[in-house]
Structure formats: C-alpha cells, structure tokens
Amino acid sequence: MASAKAEQKILDVLADMYLNQRRGMMNVQPEDGRLLRLLAEATGAKHIVEIGTSNGYSGIWFCLALRTTGGKLTTHEIDAGRASLARENFKRAGVSHIVTLVEGDAHKTVTRLKEPIDILHLDADKAGYIDYLGKLLPLARP
Ligand SMILES: C[S@@+](CC[C@H](N)C(=O)[O-])C[C@H]1O[C@@H](n2cnc3c(N)ncnc32)[C@H](O)[C@@H]1O
C-alpha cells in the first residue's frame, strides 16, 4: 500500500511535468517513458546511465523501475538551469536517494564512471554519440 502511494506520487510529478514544464525540455513522450521503465524492470537493471537529464523527466520514468530493482541512476546534464530543475523534480518525486546528477560536459564527466552499466540512455548531443559509445561501451554489461 505504501509502495502504491509512493508510485502514485511519482506518476503525479510526471503528469505535472508533462503539463507544466515540457516547453524547451525536449523530453521523451510519456509512451517512451513507459517503455524505458518496462525495459529497466524487465532486465532488472541495477545501474542506469543517462546522458541528457534535461529536467529529469525520462530519469524519473527510469526511477519507477529502479525502486523495484533496487538500482540507481547516474544522469548527466551540461545546462545548469535544467540540472537545477531536475534536482527539484527528483526531490519532489522522492527519488533523490537513487539518483546521482552529474553536472558538466558529459564528454568529460563520463570518464569518472567505473561501475558496470545495465542500460545506457544516450539522449544529448547527437554528434557526440560515437564518443559516448567509445567511452562507455566497455562498461556496458553484455
Ligand atoms: C533531449 S534533452 C534530454 C531529455 C531527457 N532525456 C528527457 O527525456 O527528459 C538533451 C539534454 O542534453 C543536454 N546536453 C547536451 N549536450 C550535453 C553534454 N555534452 N553533456 C551533458 N548534457 C548535454 C542538453 O542540455 C539537454 O538538456
């Protein structure tokens, strides 16, 4: 029951973000968010890495799964304003304890990652994907 209540709180925050914050945030669609959650739950993901946090919308979808898999999210954002909004959204969704938000240019900051990655969500500068893959594929689980 407590868990259902916590889930509803997260879904309410997502609905509010969809209604009131979408403009300029380049978020995934709610259908895609559900798919991300499903993928994470079905694979029992313990560590999800995201490049491109924006205001935290897709990250919070991942968190819905990570609550049940016992995992965590490391998400990267270069824009200070969006990172700050994301921090607020993670807080009001009650998921801050399973999220590490790394602020800065992910081309540099991802080199700090050392732990295995179960899901890598690349959703930032498209021209940079080859560089991200070169740096992060060695950490991805088969
Ligand atoms: C498409 S939006 C991410 C949307 C988010 N995944 C969602 O669905 O809610 C792309 C984000 O990547 C960020 N970004 C672009 N280049 C980046 C870089 N080099 N390092 C970190 N973040 C970057 C942008 O500031 C922007 O907020």
Image: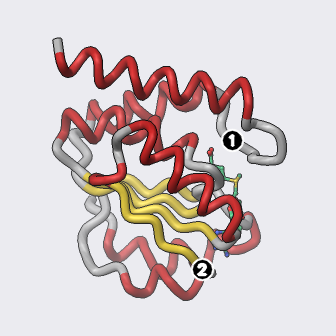
**Whole-Å distance between the Cαs marked 2 and 1?**
19 Å
- Image quadrant in which the N terminus is located: top left
The residue positioned 26% from the left and 46% from the top of the image is 45
Which of the 4 quarters of the picture holds residue 68? top left
From the viewer's perspective, tell me whether residue 126 is left or right of residue 38.
Answer: right
> Which residue is located at x 21 percent, y 40 percent?
44
Q: Which residue is mark 1?
A: 27
Give percent across and percent down for residue 96.
Answer: 36, 52
Q: Where ligand 1 lies, by quadrant? A: bottom right
- Measured from the top left, where is residue 86 in percent x and y? 56, 53
Q: Is mark 2 within 8 Å of ligand 1?
A: yes
Vertical relation: 85 (above or below) 58: below
* Vertical order, 22 against 49 (above or below): above
What numbered label is drawn on residue 104?
Answer: 2
Q: Position of residue 130 (x, y in %)?
A: 62, 74
**Relative depth, front residue between 2 and 116:** 2
